[in-house]
Image: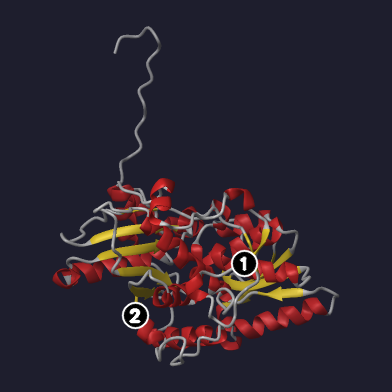
Amino acid sequence: MKGWQSQAAAAASGATPPPASTSFLQLEPYSPPTWASHIPLVPTHRFRLGILPTPIHEWRLPGLPEGVRVLIKRDDLSGMQMSGNKVVRKLEFLMAEAVQGGYDCVVTIGGIQSNHARATAVAARYLGLDCHLILRTSRQLVDSDPGLVGNLLVERLAGAQLHLVTKEEYATLGSGALLEQLRSDLKSTGRKPYIIPVGGSNSLGVWGYLESSQQLKYLLQLGGDDPAAPMITDIAMACGSGGTTAGLALGSALSPLGGRVLAFGVCDTPEYFYDYIDGLLGGLGAAPGGELLGGRRARDLLYVIQARGAGYAISTEAELRTVQEVAAATGVVLDPVYSGKAVHALLADIRARAEEWRGRTVLFVHTGGLLGMYDKLDQLEPLVQAHGAPAVRLQVRQPNAQP
């Protein structure tokens, strides 16, 4: 298994190594990569909240057609409590703004098993801020204690205050109105809340993966003259709130990284994501169709592929079978809500159009979310029992007993 992470190779290639881990939880001045320095909205500071950079390695997916190469970017290894690029990379910039602005609490919103909500709760506690989470659940459960399954356990251990709403209330009012309502309630009690949108996806949060594009360029340069070092043709990831995709698409367009960006939408429609990402880029000063983007818009920078299946956070048996097969073949565990759906759709497309994919090298960005799997135990159990090795009783022998 090849990894491109040698410091010596980095020095030989002229790449700048990433900051030392001693900066963890430190507020640092931020300077953008040279290729991004002309973007009008540039953050001034960031917190080091993740264990970064995360590694890249070969990923031999089951049933991958001959001639197609897949690598995996392991942002699921950015730290167990903060797992996932779509979480920690955005929060590094968002939490810096919250602390510098003198806010005393943060408020965000998501589904009942939101990875973003869990990471926000942990990051807030790291930095001495209170955290309020608006979580979407069913009408049947909204007036009940949500329990301690998956992300909920970490959120509640970290002291976050949970505010439950129904899926219908969320759909009718929208996340922005619900956040504004809780902001108003908190301000009326003398608090100063900092609002983080769903998934941490706003224009400031986009910088999380703009910066990651520089890390990707650095890691992929580490092969030096190694003929096995990858030339990436495609960068793929799950797309849920759009911020990760926006940062990667802009980074790929502006930096030497290159590569076609493939966003596997796990909710909403491709048109929604194109429009939303146009708005995020516009908020950075990179107006869609403007000079900075060379006249391009979001739909020119990336391809959104429908991967939501039966619906957001609703897993089909085929999707869960892919999760089980990939784990059994490679040891990489995918969460069913994001990366599991994305890899299922990616493999289906590669297998259906094997000749068109031949000769391509795909970098898949694993965005974490392991804790959310515990909400799918009932669906995963029969797959594991049917296809996994059974548990057996070890026949324990006494020290001097004959076999």
Q: Is residue 274 above or below residue 71?
A: below
For image coordinates 64% across by 74% down, the residue present is 196
Q: Nearer the viewer, mark 2 or mark 1?
A: 1
- Which circle's residue, 2 or 1, is located before the other in the chain? 1
* Label annotation for residue 30: 1
Picture quarter containing residue 150? bottom right
Residue 130: where, in percent of width, then height?
A: 74, 64
> Which residue ends up furthest to the right in the rendered image?
190
Look at label 1 and name its amino acid: Tyr
- Could you tell whether 121 is left or right of 3 in the image? right
Label 1 crowd bin: few (<14), some (14–19), many (20+), radius 10 Å: few
Residue in the foreground of this view, choosing between 204 and 295: 295
For image coordinates 44% across by 83% down, the residue present is 273
Residue 211: where, in percent of width, then height?
A: 51, 67
Q: Is residue 255 above or below residue 154?
A: below
Residue 124: where, in percent of width, then height?
A: 69, 62
Say whether residue 355 is visible: yes
For image coordinates 62% across by 48% down, the residue present is 22
Picture quarter containing residue 112? bottom right
For image coordinates 58% across by 83% down, the residue present is 40
Q: Quadrant of the C terminus?
A: top left
Look at label 2 and name its amino acid: Tyr
Residue in the foreground of this view, choosing between 351 and 127: 127
Under tag 2, what secondary structure? strand
- Could you tell whether 222 is left or right of 75 in the image? left
Q: Which residue is mark 2?
A: 303
For marks 2 and 1, give the CA distance: 30 Å
Residue 372: where, in percent of width, then height?
A: 49, 60
Under tag 1, what secondary structure? loop
